[in-house]
Amino acid sequence: MSAELSIILLNVVIILIAYAWVYPKLAGKNINKVAAIDGVTSGLALVIVANKYWGQGVIFNFFQFELNWFWFTLVTYTIIEIPIALWYFKVGLSKGSKSEKQ
């Protein structure tokens, strides 16, 4: 498995666990709590990747750009997370508004 794919899979797993279990239990629809916990989850991804690649000089290819482990992890995490976060708040806020109307 390539280094890029392993980081992308790590990011996917962390994001899915966060949005399927952690955020609904600990933050609900509170965007400030989600943002705070998201800082921890993205930091977790960076710490795990740093443990393997910090100081190794490995170059990661992101389309036409060469990035180090930090930027590759952060950029791919953000790209994967944005659509899931938009879905989470769209579904969560629409559920909240429907239940408040009843």
Image (cartoon, rainbow, N blue to C red):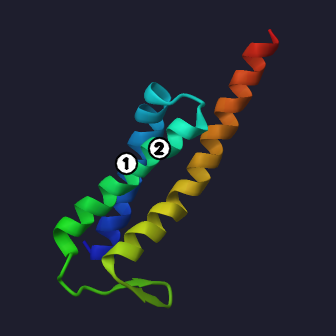
Q: Which amino acid does label 1 sit on?
A: Val
Mark 2 Cα shell of 10 Å, populated few (<14), some (14-19), many (≥20): few
**In this rendering, would 11 be left or right of 3?**
right
Provide residue 85's location: percent of width, then percent of height.
Answer: 58, 47
Provide residue 93's location: percent of width, then percent of height.
Answer: 70, 31
Residue 100: quadrant of the picture = top right
Circle 2 sits on which residue?
A: 36
Question: In percent of the image, x 38 and y 49: which residue is there?
Answer: 41
Q: What residue type is labelled 2?
A: Ala
Residue 98: quadrant of the picture = top right
SS of the residue at dot 1? helix
* Residue 24 image label: none
Residue 32: quadrant of the picture = top right
Q: Quadrant of the C terminus?
A: top right
Q: Do the residues labelled 1 and 2 touch (CB within 8 Å)?
A: yes
**In this rendering, would 35 be left or right of 96?**
left
**In this rendering, would 93 be left or right of 6?**
right
Question: In percent of the image, x 73 and y 15: which residue is there?
Answer: 99
Question: In percent of the image, x 22 and y 87: which residue is there?
Answer: 57
SS of the residue at dot 2? helix
Distance between the alpha carbons at the discs numbered 1 and 2: 7 Å
Classify 26 as above or below 16: above
Circle 1 sits on which residue?
A: 40
